[in-house]
């Protein structure tokens, strides 16, 4: 976290404009992927996660510029807290926030983390086909139909604990298959 | 550096199968740990890819879900021992090959996809099937048709309740047009 702290200090301090802008950009580059991942987990949508990245980074930069980050050593915690607040707010109020319209991030779209579309669909399908029928059904029910372990257990006539075991074994097996087929 | 969060926990996290307390603890760690961020990202990417994936040997439900996602498919009935020409037309994303056969007393099925010279292209050792459907469904996506040789034999090995095994070979000639 020392590197992030140094960046926050550069943004907050009286560094020359180019140094400050470079530090702001590097902060965004480093933290945007983490914010995006958080957004995908909680908002379950690429576009909504991209919006969260923009909003959280603008709050971060405004706070850093104003010296309002209490613990620069753990700026990641500040960003995580910001993400939680923004997601919580978006759940309370589905209307899009207007507060950030017109705000400009020192980051181009190309510098934001890429969408999770890089996995080769054909390879994923083939690797999915290689796990057993039961394991395959568990991961499909989990990730395609958002079914809980309890619901899947009822459908397959097994226990939730067994569903969890089948699920993570299948995921690990697919991941190994993808790695093997990439080489 | 390895991620100290067990893989199984990351899978449960992305499956939405953790408590609020566990969620908070996982996120607090992942936000500050590059190794766990990478590990969590891989699980997320795989989960999201699976959400869009049609398994190569499918059941009816998989095709219904693909249809709901806008995948345009054409279904063809294929009988064993009869070479069948199947056309992948413009505007079709997925060919569903219904390999017809009696599955009522079948407990397990494996599928071999072989080339005309007998060499194995793909093998699926334990595939999903619905006995009442009277067919094994091969979900042949456009990227398979374009990537693999067009002429294949699909060998379906069925293990019956009494332990007996039976084989059926389906010959498919893919054509793009």
Image (cartoon, grey):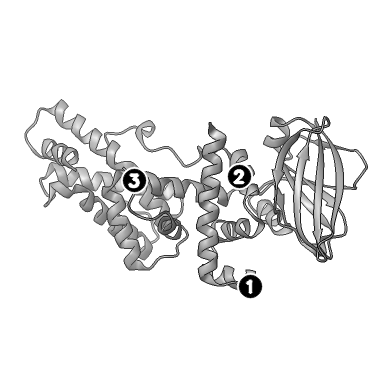
**Residue, disc 3:** B2
Tag nearer the camera, 2 or 3: 3
Q: Nearer the viewer, residue A131 or B54?
A: A131
Viewer can see residue B111: yes
**Percent x, y for residue B54?**
65, 48
**Residue, disc 1:** A157
N-terminal of the pair, mark 2 or mark 1, is: 2
**Residue, disc 2:** A127
- Whether residues under marks 2 and 1 lie with C-beta atoms below 8 angstroms apart, the answer is no
Q: Quick check: B69 left or right of A5? A: right
Q: Quick check: A123 left or right of B14? A: right
CA distance separating discs 2 and 1:
25 Å
Image quadrant for the N terminus of chain A?
A: top left
* Residues at discs 2 and 3 both on one chain: no
Q: Nearer the viewer, residue B1 or B41?
A: B1
Q: Residue at x 41, y 46 (%)?
A: B41
**Percent x, y for residue B172?**
84, 38
**Percent x, y for residue B130?**
76, 61
SS for callout 1: loop
**Percent x, y for residue A111?**
35, 32
Label placed on residue B89: none
Q: Residue furthest toward the left? A: A14
């Amino acid at each position: 976290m020392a590197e992030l702290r140094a960046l926050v200090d550069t943004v907050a301090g009286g560094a020359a404009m180019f140094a400050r802008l470079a530090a702001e950009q590097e902060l965004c580059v480093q933290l945007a992927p983490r914010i995006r991942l958080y957004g995908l987990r909680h908002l379950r949508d690429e576009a909504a996660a991209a919006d969260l990245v923009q909003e959280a980074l603008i709050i971060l930069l405004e706070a850093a510029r104003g010296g309002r980050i209490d613990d620069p050593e753990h700026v990641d915690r500040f960003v995580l807290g910001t993400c939680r607040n923004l997601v919580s707010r978006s759940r309370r109020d589905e209307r899009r926030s207007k507060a950030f319209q017109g705000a400009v991030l020192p980051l181009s779209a190309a510098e934001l983390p890429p969408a999770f579309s890089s996995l080769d669909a054909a390879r994923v399908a083939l690797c999915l086909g290689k796990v057993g029928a039961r394991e395959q059904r568990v991961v499909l029910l989990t990730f395609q139909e958002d079914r809980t372990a309890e619901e899947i257990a009822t459908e397959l006539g097994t226990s939730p604990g067994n569903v969890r075991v089948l699920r993570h074994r299948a995921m690990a097996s697919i991941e190994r298959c993808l790695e093997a087929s990439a080489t | 550096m390895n991620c100290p969060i067990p893989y199984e926990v990351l899978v449960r996290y992305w499956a939405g199968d953790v408590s609020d307390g566990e969620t908070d603890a996982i996120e607090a760690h992942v936000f500050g740990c590059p190794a766990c961020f990478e590990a969590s990202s891989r699980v997320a990417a795989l989960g999201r890819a699976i959400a869009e994936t049609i398994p190569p040997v499918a059941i009816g439900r998989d095709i219904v879900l693909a249809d709901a996602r806008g995948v345009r498919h054409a279904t063809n009935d294929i009988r064993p021992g009869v070479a069948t020409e199947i056309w992948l037309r413009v505007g079709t994303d997925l060919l569903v090959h219904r390999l017809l056969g009696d599955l009522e007393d079948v407990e397990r099925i494996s599928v071999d996809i072989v080339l005309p010279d007998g060499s194995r292209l793909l093998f699926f050792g334990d595939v999903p099937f619905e006995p009442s459907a009277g067919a094994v469904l091969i979900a042949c996506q456009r990227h398979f048709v374009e990537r693999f040789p067009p002429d294949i034999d699909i060998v379906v090995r069925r293990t019956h309740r009494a332990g007996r095994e039976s084989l059926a070979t389906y010959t498919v000639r893919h054509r793009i047009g």
